[in-house]
Image (tube, rainbow, N blue to C red):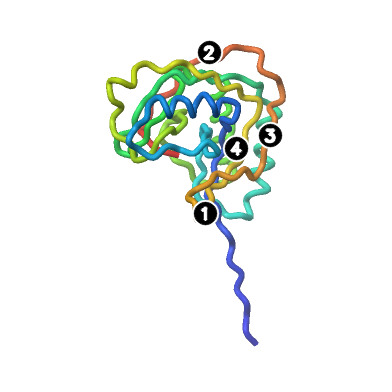
Amino acid sequence: MSQTSTSVEHRRLFFGLDAYSQSQALLELQQRLALAASPVVTDNLHLTVLFLGTVNEEQLPQLCQLGAQVASQQAGFRVVLDQLGLFPQAKVTWIGPSQAPRQLLELEQALRAGVLALGLPLDERPYRPHLTLYRKARPLPPSAGPCSPITLPVSGFHLYESCSTPDGVQYCKLASWKLAVPDSSAATGSSARSGLEVDR
């Protein structure tokens, strides 16, 4: 009698914020920079909160439960994207906050603590909030000039899967959560911890 083995599916996941509300402003920024690089398509523009990497599909319910729990304890906020940069090794041009709001850092820390409690391994490098604009990029030319601030309102967050398609990688939402308390403060707060460059 033959036995049928069942394989457990693994997914490449991360918690993040979508940038749909400011997709036009970000597209205009890409067009203004006009870098000789690969622009991130509008549907893929996002800000990673916590990168999980390859995760067993059987752990999805636990991650969704964690997302709901964290969302119930977090208030809405805003992220002011006002700094352009380049990760030279990853060859990624990004825009991010020069001052990360306290609420964003608290959201990352709460999700990190919950994921570690589930026994999942995480990258220990400090959090560097950023939104990738270009891949395969070179240093920004002097003509790029300063960056006009783009304010990203945050009323919820998502669990994304990095999906490979014939048209390239797409970031698919598996679950979404609204933050419990609406945004009532400006995007101010403590500075993001400096860390090693990584494209997520």
Figure quadrant of residue 96? top left
Residue 130 in the figure: left or right of residue 143: right
Kind of residue indicated by mark 4:
Gly
If you read the primary sequence from the N terminus, does the residue marked by circle 1 or circle 4 appear first?
A: 4
Figure quadrant of residue 185? top right
Image: 159 above or below 168: above
If you read the primary sequence from the N terminus, does the residue marked by circle 2 or circle 4 appear first?
A: 4
Residue 159 x, y percent position in the rendering:
61, 41
Foreground: disc 1 or disc 3: 1
If you read the primary sequence from the N terminus, does the residue marked by circle 2 or circle 3 appear first?
A: 3
Residue 49 x, y percent position in the rendering:
53, 33
Instruction: Find out whether the residues at labels 3 and 4 contact each other: C-beta distance under 8 Å.
Output: no
Kind of residue indicated by mark 1:
Thr
Residue that badge 3 annotates: 177
Quote the CA–CA distance across marks 2 and 4: 25 Å
If you read the primary sequence from the N terminus, does the residue marked by circle 3 or circle 4 appear first?
A: 4
Foreground: disc 1 or disc 4: 1
Name the residue rendered at 49%, 39% in the picture.
Answer: 41
Residue that badge 1 annotates: 165
Residue that badge 2 annotates: 188
Residue that badge 4 annotates: 114
Quote the CA–CA distance across marks 2 and 1: 38 Å
Quote the CA–CA distance across marks 1 and 4: 30 Å
Quote the CA–CA distance across marks 1 and 3: 26 Å
Instruction: Find out whether the residues at labels 1 and 4 contact each other: C-beta distance under 8 Å.
Output: no
29 or 185, nearer to the observer: 29
Image: 189 above or below 7: above
Q: Secondary structure at mark 1?
A: strand
Q: Are there few (<14), some (14-19), or many (20+) residues within 10 Å of tag 4? A: some
